Structures are given as structure tokens and as C-alpha cells.
Image: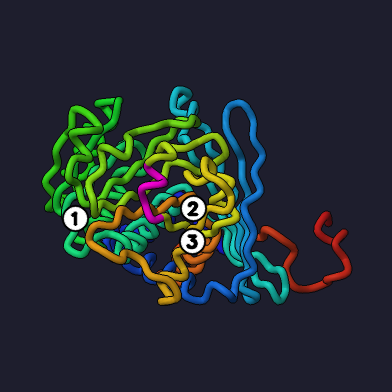
């Protein structure tokens, strides 16, 4: 049988664990899997594009378990009352091919993206960073804010979005959590990023955007760019990339989809796992401008699916479904029709 975790059940699981504690456990699981990077068979995700957006499959395996995520990205969806991103994930046993878990992954993607962002910032941002500018206040905003407060100690947030309702929504939701963070609604990107320790960009438009230039940056800032995640979709101009030391999840995928798609293929970048295992340096000086060019990678989803499977079993959440034939009569598939 396959355990099903639908959206209401996953939300219940996160509430039962506690949102902050869930993020801590998720970041720890992601870090542990990054540290065993060579154990994974990795591929860039498979993408099918259309005029309205993209649908992608994200597979990965560590030899014992295989997982994939189905995920879309359609920036025009909100005008139709639909989320920009929708996803589900599958975790399977490699030895038999049996699907163990079928899980909602839209909420889970937001959580793992935030946990990965904060994990990267822990080794790339200046120690003692307390102020973050958040450019783009849509579906990712609350998760990024909570992860950076919980895992990095951010206490000041400067919000900017060209849609004031998005910023108001984010401020309202954070207030409801009782988060001890001072929030400023910035009137411009310039106002938001001036002197901020960390700048998170999380915009949705499928375009080569230039949210700010290199002249607007301050030495020592860390850029957490999570909005660029497919060909033709970036947030930062090449001049900003050239001013920064660049870190990525999986270079073969990021060169296709990330900010660095704008730069020559021979441009050197550092993969995050190398920093987390001590094989490469992260931030080297207080004046470094660091950039985490994050597009989302299947290892992060694999870690998230493994975590929720374990937590759901411990709490007896979800229910089993006959997604594929079970034991008994393995050569008589026709019996399923009787």
C-alpha cells in the first residue's frame, strides 16, 4: 500500500510538529543529504514549456530510495484564481519499485525552499545578520521570513512588492504568527535593500528582469535569489552576478535555469554541498558579496519527502491507498478486473 498525504493532512502534520520546529528538522535533513552528495544519482529536471508556463519532473535516487516531484510554474495563474506553483511528490523503494508515499508538494516546496535558503545563508551571510530585504511578497514570502527568523535570527524585515496588497498580506500573516520581527513596508526596491544584510528576491514574472544594479549593493551583503528557475526567467542583471561570489545547488541545472544562464558556461561557481562538507570556502571576508543562485533541486524534495514520511508514520497521519497492485498473484494482473 502507498501512504497518501494530501494537502489538509500535510498541513495538519506541520501544525502538529510546529512550524518553526518543522523548518529546523527540514533544514537538518536537507543538510544531511547535501553532505552525502556523492551517494545520489542526479539529473537536471525535465521541463516542458508552453507560452503560459512550464511543467517539470524532478527525479533523484540515493540507491535505496527514489523520488520525483511533478511541479508547474505558470505566472499568469493567479489571474485565474490558481496558484503559480502546484506540485506533488512520490517516494519509492528502489529494491522493489514500490511507491511508498504520494504527497502534496506545493506547501512542501515552499517549506523546503525556505529551509534551503536559510541553510545556505548560514554559511554565506555575514555572522550576526539581522536585517533582510524581501523583494516579491507573494506565496514564498511568509516561509522565507519565518525560516530566516527561526534559523538565522533575522529581526528586521523590509518588504517591497509592486502590488501593495501582496505586502499587506505578508505583513498580516506574519503578525498573526506573533513573530518578533520589525517590519517596514518600503516604498521602493532602493529603500528596501539599502544596507540590508540579506536581500531575498522572490519574483514570479517570466522575464529577464533587473531588480537592482551592482551600484546599489553594499559590501558584505548576501543575495538569496530564488525567483529565477527556468530559461528566460531571471531577476538580476549580469553586472550584479559579476560583482558576487556565486553559489548554486547543482551547476548543470542552474546553468540552464538560474541567474547564471546569462553568463558564459565556463564561469566558475561553487556548489552548496562543497561548502557544507568543508571542501570549498563559503564567505571568505566581511566585504564579500555572496549570491545563492537557487533554482530548487530534487535532492531538497527527496529530503522533504523522507522527512514527512517518517513524521507521518510516527503520528499515524495519512491513509493507505491501493495505488498499485499489492502482494498476491503477481502474474495475474487480470484479477484486478474481477
61 is higher (above) or lower (below) than 193: below
Q: Are marks 3 and 1 in contact (CB under 8 Å)?
A: no
Q: Which residue is mark 1?
A: 154
Residue stretch rendered in magenta on the structure: 240-245
Which residue corresponds to the image point at 53% horizontal and 38% vertical from the top-left? 73
> Which quadrant is the C terminus positioned in?
bottom right
Which residue corresponds to the image point at 47% horizontal and 62% vertical from the top-left? 270
51 is higher (above) or lower (below) than 254: above
Let me know if residue 242 is in the magenta part: yes
Name the spot of residue 306 as percent of width and height, x first.
50, 68
Q: Which residue is mark 3?
A: 300
Name the spot of residue 291 as percent of width and height, x first.
37, 52
- For disc 2, the neighbor class at 10 Å (few under 14, some 14 to 19, many from 20) is many
Q: Which mark is residue 296?
A: 2
Front residue of this view, candidates 119 and 213: 213
Secondary structure beneath label 2 = loop
Secondary structure beneath label 3 = helix
145 is higher (above) or lower (below) than 327: above
Residue 141, by quadrant, is: top left
N-term-proximal mark, 1 vs 2: 1
Amino acid at each position: 500500500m502507498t501512504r497518501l498525504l494530501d494537502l489538509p493532512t500535510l498541513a495538519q502534520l506541520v501544525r502538529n510538529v510546529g512550524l518553526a520546529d518543522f523548518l529546523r528538522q527540514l533544514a537538518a535533513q536537507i543538510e544531511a543529504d547535501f553532505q552525502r552528495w556523492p551517494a545520489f544519482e542526479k539529473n537536471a529536471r525535465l521541463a516542458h514549456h508552453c507560452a503560459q508556463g512550464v511543467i517539470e519532473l524532478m527525479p533523484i535516487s540515493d540507491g535505496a530510495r527514489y523520488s520525483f516531484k511533478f511541479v508547474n510554474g505558470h505566472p499568469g495563474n493567479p489571474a485565474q484564481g490558481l496558484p503559480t506553483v502546484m506540485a506533488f511528490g512520490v517516494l519509492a523503494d528502489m529494491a522493489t519499485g514500490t511507491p511508498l508515499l504520494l504527497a502534496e508538494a506545493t506547501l512542501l516546496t515552499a517549506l523546503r525552499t525556505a529551509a534551503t535558503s536559510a541553510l545556505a545563508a548560514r554559511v554565506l551571510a555575514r555572522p550576526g545578520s539581522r536585517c533582510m530585504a524581501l523583494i516579491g511578497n507573494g506565496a514564498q514570502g511568509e516561509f522565507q521570513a519565518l525560516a530566516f527568523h527561526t534559523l538565522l535570527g533575522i529581526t528586521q524585515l523590509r518588504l517591497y512588492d509592486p502590488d501593495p496588497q501582496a505586502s499587506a498580506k505578508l505583513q498580516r500573516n506574519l503578525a498573526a504568527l506573533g513573530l518578533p520581527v520589525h517590519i517596514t513596508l518600503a516604498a521602493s526596491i532602493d529603500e528596501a535593500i539599502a544596507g540590508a544584510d540579506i536581500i531575498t528576491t522572490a519574483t514570479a514574472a517570466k522575464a529577464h528582469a533587473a531588480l537592482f544594479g551592482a551600484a546599489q549593493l553594499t559590501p558584505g551583503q548576501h543575495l538569496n535569489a530564488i525567483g529565477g528557475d527556468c530559461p528566460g526567467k531571471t531577476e538580476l542583471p549580469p553586472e550584479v552576478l559579476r560583482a558576487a561570489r556565486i553559489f548554486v545547488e547543482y551547476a548543470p541545472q542552474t546553468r540552464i535555469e538560474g541567474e547564471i544562464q546569462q553568463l558564459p558556461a565556463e564561469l566558475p561557481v561553487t556548489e552548496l554541498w562543497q561548502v557544507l562538507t568543508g571542501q570549498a570556502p563559503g564567505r571568505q571576508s566581511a566585504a564579500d558579496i555572496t549570491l545563492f543562485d537557487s533554482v530548487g533541486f530534487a535532492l531538497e524534495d527527496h529530503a522533504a519527502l523522507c522527512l514527512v514520511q517518517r513524521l507521518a508514520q510516527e503520528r499515524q497521519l495519512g491513509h493507505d491507498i491501493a495505488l498499485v497492485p499489492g502482494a498476491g498473484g503477481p502474474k495475474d494482473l487480470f484479477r484486478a478486473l474481477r
